[in-house]
Amino acid sequence: MNDAAGGVAPPAGATLHRPPPLPPRPYQFPRFERALLANGLQVVVAPMRKLPITTVVALIDAGAICGYRGKEGIAGLTSELLLEGTGDFNGAELMERLERLGTTIDPSANWDGTWLTFTALKEQLAPALALLAKVMRQPAFPEREVERLKAERLADLLKLRAEPRGLADVMFSRVLYDPTSRYTMPELGSERSVPLITRADVQRFYGWRYQPHSVTLVIVGDITPDEARRLAERSFGDWAGSTPESCAVVDRPARHHRALHIVAKPDAKQSEVRIGNVGIPRHHRDYHSTVVMNAVLGGLFSSRINLNLRERHGYTYGAFSHVDWRRYAGPFVVSTAVQSEVTAPAAREAVSEIERIRQEKVSEDELSLATSYLDGVFPIRYETTDAIAGALAALVEYRLPDDFYDTYREQVRSVSTEDVLRVAQAHLHPEELQLLIVGDPDTVRTPCESIGFGSATLYDTEGNALSGE
Amino acid sequence: MEIPIDTFRLPNGLFVTLSEDHTAPIVAVNLWYHVGSANERAGRTGFAHLFEHMLFQGSRDVGSNEHFELIQRAGGTLNGSTWLERTNYFETVPSNQLELVLWLESNRMGHLLPAMTQQKLDTQRDVVKNERRWSMDNQPYGTWWEKLPALCFPAEHPFHHSLIGSMRDLDAASLDDVRSFFQTFYTPENAVLTVTGDFEPGQTRRWIERHFGPIPPGSGRPAMPEVEMPRTFGAWKRELVQDNVMLPRLFLAFLSPVFGSDQFYAASACATILGVKKGSRLYKALVRERQVAAETQAFTYDLTRGADLLVLDVTARPNISGEQLEHEVAREVDLLRASGVTADELARAVTLIKTEFIAALQAAGERADRLSMFATYFGDPSRINEQVERYAAVTVDDVNAFIDERLGDDNRASLLFVPKPGAVKVNRSGEMAGVHA
């Protein structure tokens, strides 16, 4: 039934039965308003009245790319420590106050920003927002909690070493980027950097990055713009501060030739496989074409890579490609987990799909699958207050134009097969692909050394090279 | 807040729930079949889940994998999942594509077998084996999924065996099994269909009658397996697993009141008090104060017959032994037994549960899934509108009665993962020293 492209053919005559779509009903991404407080703090509000619930994101320009060399992980650690005590409450008291309001403030630091997020019922919004302001403005950073959270992050890093998927992601970035790049380490830092962070470092980082000018408060849900502005003014209006400069990161690759990296897990029943190259920044003009190209190649269940590796060969439970969008150039990567014995043929198939999409235009049928999916699924992605708040925060984080979501579907629909070929040729680099495998070296090494990536560099699970380069 | 609900039943037995919401031009279709791993026969563990995969391999008028492609081309999302007592299939699409989804679901409910081939079964068998390797065998602690029910339920009990199945049983599955499983369980009277979101009810009902109406009924709802369980284990059951892990992790399970019963709500609130989020007792005592654990969770399996399981899931900090971890967790449970819960703790739990419940109902797919759940398990989707009240009605006495009856030494099952001896060691500073191949 499957044709050469791994596509699908309906049984003869079957299309006659298929109900055609009705005319599409109109859709508009939720309207939002911006306001600027006198101290430079930005407020973005999108009213949504479906359920009595509101999501708030405080986005701070304090991503993991900001920080100090050798103290990687400080952005995330600082964001968590905000909730571990203020002038008048200790961490346990803060947690109890929030949870009695039916909510929690979830801190996280991605590459380009720190996010403090909560979702609360309407009647709890004002007190929860007041607590958010308190933790952002008056953190105490108790020494005991600094040490406790450092130990917890070290435990996370340890667990990662035993977890093949996470280990593969971490090691892929490590081998992909220039050794001086912050991107060679995970956002949360490393076993070497986290122990070196001190309370004084956290205070310095907080004083540097947490300024009203670098904060955007996104409020989405059962609220009017006036109410939202009033609440923001009441909690943050008298916060004064300076304007910190933006942070930058090295995003060039470690090398311009193919290389094979094997992280030794001698008893692994499966290989985790990562193949890719350095991609493009989020702000790139090829963004929409690249999203569509990736959807044809490996972004969907029905994409080439999954149909090939899963449905045609049964090598895997799933195989996907992904562009990790950041302010600077994140990785383009194909990810899959395959039975150890078929690691080399599976990697070869994935590489051949990367090569094929650069050699000839994709079919109109494949293009329309990708564009109609991305176009149609857009409203489904933004059903909830937290999804919309996340989208609006991303707008600020990546400095996108205000009409980005209003024009997204049109932009995607206008991508052509020529565009797909052009961006595949421009942004996929078969001659530079890095192939990383977490698996059993006795089983995978010899076969994988014969598929055009040279001889393997072996690593232990801590990332130390055991042989090779 | 009240979710609008309209229900009807087709002559062939299919139960339908409609729930309108015109906020966005999105519609969700959700089908629950009242069959799960508990219905598998001996020697065919994992079959309900393998069968779920086969439902994406085409039907009389749909090509192999075409179901996925048609939905994605329509701009929709889709998937399916298998649990002990049910299997579900679901799509969310732009609202103008509703009839296509209803047709696709009806085609595989009515006409699956003409499309089944040995080759498709063989490929999906390989895919499922890789799913097993990926989610369990090659994942630290991954085997807890099959070890915990196996520890908690006796060998012949329908909840005892592995949901994903053994490699041997997966190998044994045949096209004959596919045929008889389909004919027994995938019948209109053993399914519920839910549509939520932006649709026109009259037209939708006509589409459902047109596409699902002609499907013949099966031979009555299949008999449910016997699932009776005592109220407690009668002893403290223990299993120690030496695994490829860095840190000890304890799953401590208790037999608890079945999902949907009055006592279930007290048990669920108790789980939140004990182990959900950072204000919970386990987190405060073991992570924050004594610093012996790195994280804590608590959850219920939501089983509706025989017995449910309430599970505490606690991971140790480096340098804490498995034995010490179990001792510390048990001590917290004993403290709870001695002191009981406070009104404040209960209020916290109920407010957290309420916020999460309402937040989840924002998405059409989530609403549909919960409506299908209440329709399948209780024949009454409108129970969705009672949930907030039922949690609010739980009293301190209810929770304490649950604790007295169910959290004692005679009703505990410990599944304890510890690092394999001789593997990587962790020294006091949390750095690793070890032997590498």
Image (cartoon, coloured by chain):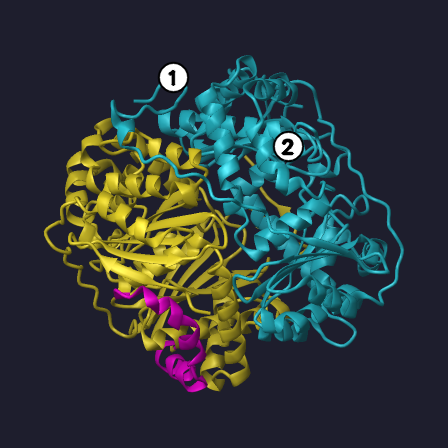
Chain colours: A cyan, B yellow
On the question of residue B369 being in view, the answer is yes
Please, what is the dominant secondary structure of the magenta stretch?
helix
Whether discs 2 and 1 lie on one chain: the answer is yes
Q: Which residue is mark 1?
A: A4
Q: Label 1 neighbourhood size at 10 Å, few (<14), some (14-19), many (20+)?
A: few
Left or right position of A327 against B6: right
Query: Does the residue at mark 2 contact the one at mark 1 (Cβ under 8 Å)?
Result: no
Residue A469 location (% of width, % of height): 67, 23
What's the chain of the residue with tag 2?
A: A
Query: What element does badge 1 sit on?
Result: loop
Q: Within the magenta stretch, is there residue A402?
A: no
Q: Is residue B431 above or below residue A224?
A: above
Residue at position x 51%, y 26% in the image? A297
Q: Is residue A299 above or below residue B338?
A: above
Residue at position x 22%, y 60% in the image? B157
Query: What element does badge 2 sit on?
Result: strand
What's the chain of the residue with tag 1?
A: A
Residue A343 location (% of width, % of height): 46, 26
Could you say which is closer to the camera, residue B255 or residue B392? B392
Q: Which residue is mark 2?
A: A331
Indicate which disc, 2 or 1, sits on the residue closer to the N terminus.
1
Disc 2 versus disc 1: distance between alpha carbons? 29 Å
Residue A144 location (% of width, % of height): 73, 67
Q: Amino acid at mark 2?
A: Pro
Q: Amino acid at mark 1?
A: Ala
Residue A372 location (% of width, % of height): 48, 32
Magenta region, residue range: B378-407
Quadrant of the image occupied by residue A234: bottom right
On the question of residue A83 being in view, the answer is no
Left or right position of B73 against A99: left
Quarter of the picture holding the N terminus of chain A: top left
